[in-house]
Image: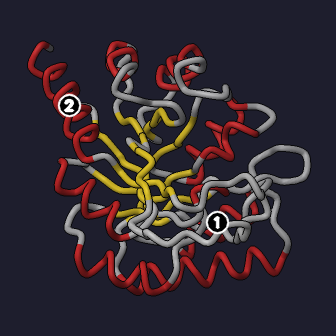
Amino acid sequence: MAKLEICCYGIDCALTAERAGADRIELCAAPNEGGLTPSAGVLKKVKQLVSIPVHPIIRPRGGDFCYSDREFDTMLEDIRFIRELGYPGLVIGMLDAEGHIDLLRMKQVMEAAQGMAVTFHRAFDMCHNPQQALEQLTGLGVARILTSGQQQNAELGLSLLRELKQHSHTPIIMAGAGVRLGNLQKFVEAGIEEVHSSAGQSVPSVMRYRKAGVSMSADAEADEFNRYCVDGDVVAAMKAVLAAAKTAA
């Protein structure tokens, strides 16, 4: 049966995803940035409370995936920290200025993460040559590649996803970006072994008092009294689709 990874932003989301039947969690902070490294407190608490495999993302900032020396040193420190906590895997990705896999740094990542499963994230979708990148990541020994097939969403990228899968058993090609209950069957039919979804919903704040005219966001129009949460019912429904597909096979 295809595995379902759920992107979780915090401890409550992670516990919801686990209870609903997720196979694995990608743990992040900062959903508006596309996912950043979680805090030390979150990492410690999730390790204590969540039983299914959790792979934290190692990403020091939003924006592109070409990092300064200081940023990369920080990433190595974060890898050492989550390895010491006993996490089984991590999610990371980096490119050079020309849009190729940063091989020198990724070799250092693989050494620092020895014994952990490394997922190369959607930096892959920004790379110059996906076929060459697949060959390089295979040589590095990464466990999986999270990709939308170099399109805005994975449904649009299904053609490249199929092509990559035909050329790779390891690393696993995991479809992500816009993978939802409504289109999950398309990925099953394409033979995708793992799918990644936020399975999220917007949840209103419990605050009754709401100060007007003051915003903590640079975007003055942002609604700070709604937040992202994993929808356990959606996770369970996606798992049911995957289970039914296995039975039918």
The x and y percentages for residue 214 are 72, 71
Q: Quadrant of the N terminus?
A: top left
Q: Quadrant of the C terminus?
A: top left
Q: Which residue is mark 1?
A: 59
Horizontal placement of 55 versus 154: left or right? Answer: left
Residue closest to the eye, 24 or 138: 24
The x and y percentages for residue 190 are 39, 15
Up-down relation of residue 91 to residue 138 (above or below): below
The x and y percentages for residue 118 are 49, 58
Query: Residue, x 68% and y 47% (percent of image)?
Result: 123
* Amino acid on which disc 1 is placed: Arg
Horizontal placement of 182 versus 34: left or right? Answer: left
Query: Residue, x 23% and y 76% (percent of image)?
Result: 49
Residue 87 placement: quadrant: bottom left
The residues bearing labels 2 and 1 have C-alpha atoms spaced at a distance of 30 Å
The x and y percentages for residue 65 are 76, 56
Disc assigned to residue 1: 2
Residue closest to the eye, 86 or 148: 148
Sequence-wise first label, 2 or 1 = 2
Residue at the limit of the structure toward the left, as seen here: 247
Query: Residue, x 37% and y 84% (percent of image)?
Result: 44
Is label 2 or label 1 in front?
A: 1
Q: How many residues crowd mark 1 within 10 Å: few (<14), some (14–19), many (20+)?
A: many
* Amino acid on which disc 2 is placed: Met
Up-down relation of residue 88 to residue 234 (above or below): below
